Image (tube, rainbow, N blue to C red):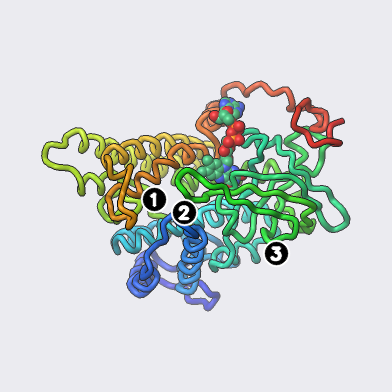
Amino acid sequence: MSDDSGSGALGPMEDLESFRARAKAWLADQVPGLAAGGVPAMGEGDGGQERAALAKRIQAALYEGRLAGPTFPVEYGGLGLTVAHRDAFNDEVRSYGADAVDLFNLVGGLWGLSIGMIAPTMLEFGTEEQKHTHIGGMLRGETLWAQMLSEPTGGSDLAGAITRADLDGDVYVVNGSKVWTSQADFSDMAVMLARTNWDVPKHAGLSMLIVDLTSPGLEIIPLRLSSGGTGFCQEFMTDVAVPKTNVLGTPGDGWNVASRLLVHERNTVGGGSTFHTMFVGRGSGGGTRRNAGVGSVGLARKVAGPGDADLVQDAMKDHVTNTVSGHLAARVVEAMAIGALPPAAGSMLRLFGSMAGITSSDITMEIAGTSAVAWPSDGSAPGSAVGVGYLGRQGGAMASGTAEIQRNIISERVLGLPREPAQDRDVAFKDVRTNTMPSGTAG
Ligand SMILES: Cc1cc2nc3c(=O)[nH]c(=O)nc-3n(C[C@H](O)[C@H](O)[C@H](O)COP(=O)(O)OP(=O)(O)OC[C@H]3O[C@@H](n4cnc5c(N)ncnc54)[C@H](O)[C@@H]3O)c2cc1C
């Protein structure tokens, strides 16, 4: 039964049924108000800011309702419960229906980076102060986070980062540029990979910094996409001062921190996170979702006639792939938990998920037909969201590392095949031959 210790959370002893009943009651009480204005669409006007504001309101309401961060430790604002509790909440969301599913797909999408990826990395590497301040801030719905890893010189070779952070007294002075930073234009904080030592090989000279996105000298430029939205940004740092206490982990250990961050990212994106907040998932529709974000099964229900055998076959192919994806996630997560697979196995989920996403996008586009190519401006056509989604189809398979990179990781770190050759592995980074080093850096 409940351990109502007055700690702000119900405590680790709350049983599943009591948690489920509270979740059900909370949804009945909160969803009508939270869903009243609808979920602002991506790619329309100031959609990103409005979506972020709503996602923060929902997360804050969850925290108030003692439902936020089920698997996070109580001392950092979580509930100290189990994945089964988190899953029970998601079951209740699905049972509630389309309004709740829409809201929690938003929460899953926008808080995934913070709560699914950065907070678990902080649990592993953060100081007590960092954990209390930042994980608590996320779970209370106050601070959205971004991750600044990729650079204009390349995202796959993350360890080749050339954004520099030079220690000057009590601060690091950061100069450089990051790119493809999801949701940077409406986030509050970020983790940033920067080079703090040029005299050691590339993997050894990096540090992970915690950066306030309102810092002077940090310019954030949203990048306009073909969908009309601004899903990510480029940032330029000119003498940005970051307190030296804002290193996550130890100075020079940034590659290790980034590697764990990426493991949490691949688990989150692949559907295998044990931390990710309430997330109902992409799925193949299942019939609960409304037009926006509707999957192939929901769409086929709307448009298929008795003679549309091919269309139904396609919808079933997508449905089966999504079902397999869910089972694969459960199996890989369990195997990682008992040590039967290494943490790098999260790349299997990411790879399968990106292939499934592309198939799903193609199939839903096919089913939606012309309604996914042109639609009335009120967005009422069944395929309007599908058409916009299709434009982001390839991007979804690149975020958190391309398919080639996932295959490299699986081959080297899961299957033990030989490593890729690298000319720069044991060379001081300043001596690595390149044509992209900032002037005055190369030795
Ligand atoms: C939707 C989306 C969201 C993103 N969000 C973020 C974010 O929030 N923060 C962030 O830091 N970054 C983000 N990214 C960037 C993303 O991580 C990079 O796009 C990705 O790592 C690839 O880097 P790149 O685009 O520079 O391509 P490159 O690294 O230049 O790669 C180009 C091509 O070469 C191939 N390639 C490169 N190296 C190898 C190799 N060793 N073996 C085989 N093939 C190779 C790649 O597979 C790719 O096809 C996002 C990207 C997308 C599309």
Front-most of residues 3 and 400 = 400
Q: Label 3, secondary structure: give it.
A: helix
Q: Is residue 414 visible?
A: no
Q: Position of residue 365 (x, y in %)?
A: 32, 39
**Measured Cα–Cα span from mark 3 to mark 2:** 27 Å
**Measured Cα–Cα span from mark 1 to mark 2:** 9 Å
Q: Label 2, secondary structure: give it.
A: helix
* Image quadrant assignment for residue 197: top right
Mark 2 crowdedness (10 Å alpha carbons): few <14, some 14-19, many ≥20: some
At horizontal 73% and vertical 36% (from top left) the residue drawn is 203
Q: Which residue is mark 2?
A: 109
| Left or right, 252 with reference to 139 | right
Q: Position of residue 420 (x, y in %)?
A: 63, 23
Q: Amino acid at mark 1?
A: Gly
Determine the residue located farthest toward the bottom in the rendered image.
6
Q: Select label 3 or label 2 by which is in front.
A: 2
Front-most of residues 228 and 28 = 228
| Left or right, 4 with reference to 439 | left
| Left or right, 32 with reference to 242 | left
Q: Which residue is mark 1?
A: 281
Of labels 1 and 3, earlier in sequence is 3
Mark 3 crowdedness (10 Å alpha carbons): few <14, some 14-19, many ≥20: few
* Quarter the N terminus occupies: bottom left
At horizontal 36% and vertical 42% (from top left) the residue drawn is 327
Q: Which residue is mark 3?
A: 129
Q: Position of residue 130 (x, y in %)?
A: 68, 61
Q: Position of residue 58 (x, y in %)?
A: 45, 67
Of labels 3 and 2, earlier in sequence is 2
Of labels 1 and 2, earlier in sequence is 2
* Image quadrant assignment for residue 88: bottom left
